Image (cartoon, rainbow, N blue to C red):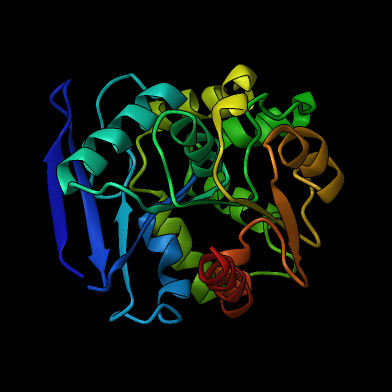
Amino acid sequence: MTIHFFTTDDGVKLAYRTFGRGPEQILMLHGFNCTSRNFDWMLSFFAPDRYTVVLPDLRGGGASDKPDTGYTLERFGRDTLALIRGLGWQQFSLVGHSTGGAIAQWIAAEVPLRTLILLGPVPATGVPMSPEGAAMFRAAAESAEGRAAVWQMGWSTPIPADLLDGLVSDSMTWRREAMLEMFEAWSNANFPERLAHIHVPTLVVGAQHEPFLTADFLHANVVSQISGARFVEVPNSNHYMHIEQPAFTAGVVIGFLAAH
């Protein structure tokens, strides 16, 4: 896929890739310690003559610029809105994983969508965690070993070494300061009042072995807060279900799109 670029209103150049050329438009937002490449395991299940999928790299990682500061959920959301306006999209589906799921909720309250699909999403009220848990996520900013630990925490079995090496290499595109600010942004998210403005078909997807964003937690903090939202759980998977179980996860997404 060819990498394209656009410039935000604060002069940051952001990268995005496009897959397919079909009439159904989907934008996918990645999360913390990730880039848009983490959706690639699912893409082969999307018929390119039916779907057009746009995959941006959030500022701070991937092929996008990495400014000194400015890594807030609102800033990520406004970056994405600028891309959507540049594409000229009027009605599209939005998929967000993890922190990308929090950003997707922020966007869904701002513009009309066709559907909203949240994969292991961070809620609009953040994720309470122990000092030990917070220390693990902050350590990810400091070294490849720290980033690998976050990947393994979100996997239901030991990750094969070659796969882990590739995932960590992708994670290492993230600037240290960006990761630290992004962690504070998603762990302390606080925009629950916006959820009342989401009025589109919404699917929340959880994972069977998720350590933080469990089914009960997602029901209480995401599903019950968005009008009409539905929940599906991916078996034999953890937080990165779109990589660990790509066929099942893609099937859930495609099935929901087809129903709406």
> Count the marks: how many?
0
Residue depicted at x 72% and y 53%: 230
| Residue 25 x, y percent position in the rendering | 33, 61
Query: Which residue is more in the foreground, 138 or 233?
Result: 233
Q: Is residue 156 left or right of residue 171?
A: right
- Image quadrant where residue 213 sits: top right
Q: Is residue 16 left or right of residue 243?
A: left
Q: Is residue 183 left or right of residue 192?
A: left
Can residue 52 be seen? yes
Quadrant where the image shows the N terminus: bottom left
Can residue 160 be seen? no
Residue depicted at x 28% and y 21%: 68
- In the orientation shown, which residue stands out farthest toward the right? 216
Query: Which residue is more in the foreground, 56 or 133?
Result: 56
Residue depicted at x 47% and y 73%: 42
Query: Which residue is more in the foreground, 192 or 79?
Result: 192
| Residue 190 x, y percent position in the rendering | 61, 18
- Image quadrant where residue 240 sits: bottom right
- Determine whether 133 is above or below 253 in the image: above
Residue depicted at x 13% and y 41%: 6
- Determine whether 221 is above or below 251 in the image: above
| Residue 148 x, y percent position in the rendering | 56, 53
- Determine whether 8 is above or below 42 in the image: above
| Residue 62 x, y percent position in the rendering | 30, 49
Q: Is residue 139 left or right of residue 58?
A: right
Query: Which residue is more in the foreground, 249 or 224?
Result: 224
